[in-house]
Amino acid sequence: MKRFILVPMIIFLLVISPSQVNAISMPCSMVLEPVDQNLINAKGTALLYKVQLFPPSFARTNISILAVHLPEPSNYGDFDSYEGFAYIPDEISWRFRLFPTPEEISPTWAGRFDLITADMKNVDVQVRLSNTKTKKLGPVVLKSNIDQCK
């Protein structure tokens, strides 16, 4: 009799319990692809992982972005920089400046943001144009979704 109760209970728990199939494991990285297919050399990568900056507080999520072979921001209009932009639709967004390396031709752009406390589900990560004086955020140049995180 106990076996007849135990087996359906186990099956019920396996079927009803929350699935971890969509959860990402950290650390993970994703390739950021160009929105404009004419930018054949432009690529980027985003690294997501847990950091503990203020012990004994809890760990936060870090997003670090590195982008290469991007055109000069001014080629797109009144822009002078790039920013990392990550968001969970209809919930929250984060933006952070990317800084160029000193190469004269086609610098590498890199930056990070360390203070994310949100659950990292359905996150879009982008590299966008930016005007540092007006704080205006411009169009997306590179993008990916956390579903691509490996």
Image: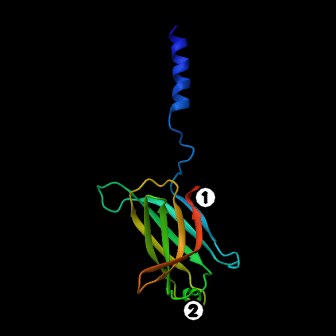
Vertical order, 142 against 70 (above or below): above
Asked where in the image residue 66 lies, by quadrant, the reply is bottom right
Residue placed at 43% from the left, 67% from the top? 94
Q: Which residue is at a point 61% across and 85% down the rendered structure image?
A: 71
Mark 2 and mark 1: Cα distance apart in space? 32 Å
Indicate the position of residue 99 as horizontal and vertical percent values.
Answer: 48, 81
SS category of the residue bearing label 2:
loop
Answer with mark 2 or mark 1, whichever residue precedes in sequence.
2
Q: Is residue 73 left or right of residue 90?
A: right
Where's the C terminus, which quadrant?
bottom right
Tell me if mark 1 has few (under 14), some (14-19) or many (20+) residues whose alpha carbon lies within 10 angstroms of its own. few
SS label for mark 1: helix
| Residue 117 image position (x, y, % from top left) | 38, 57
* Residue type beneath disc 1: Gln
Residue 148, label in figure: 1
Figure colour scheme: rainbow
